[in-house]
Image (cartoon, rainbow, N blue to C red):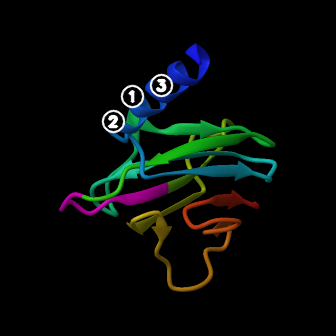
Amino acid sequence: MAVALSTAVTSLTLLSQPAFADCTRHVYNKSENVWSFGFTSTAEEKLGDDAMIVASGKTAVIEHITGGSEPKWLRLDKVTYTDGKPHYKASFLMNGCYIQHTGRTDRAVLNDPADGDVIFID
């Protein structure tokens, strides 16, 4: 009985906690390159120190927090260490956990396998 009561109290406590993310998604780097990503408030904004780096063959977790009145953009940058300059830059408007785009994204697959997921392929 004590175990059941403890589990019930723990469950109620977890249910009463505020949610920190509306959805958890992934960035898969299936390319030979190093990539960075992050969220910005405009399409033109640079990532700067807030960029998350994903090395070749690695996976990163994205915690999407949706809502609010400000637009949120997902910025993707291909990073190289030979000259330090990104070779690919793109920003995509977020709609909840869905990444909006109008067709080919060239070096990244968006919303696959789930809405909000990114797979780097180049």
Q: Which residues are magenta?
A: 68-75
36 in relation to 3, above or below: below
Please tell me which of labels 3 and 2 falls first in the chain. Answer: 3
Q: Position of residue 85 (x, y in %)?
A: 55, 45
Residue corresponding to mark 2: 16
Outermost residue, top side: 2
Mark 1 belongs to which amino acid?
Thr
54 in relation to 89, above or below: above
Residue corresponding to mark 1: 13
Residues tagged 1 and 2 counted as in contact (Cβ below 8 A): yes
Q: Position of residue 46 (x, y in %)?
A: 37, 49
Residue pictured at 32% horizontal, 59% vertical: 72
Residue pictured at 77% horizontal, 42% vertical: 56
Tell me: 72 left or right of 68.
right
Tell me: 90 left or right of 108.
left
Secondary structure state at the residue bearing disc 3:
helix
Res 10 label: 3
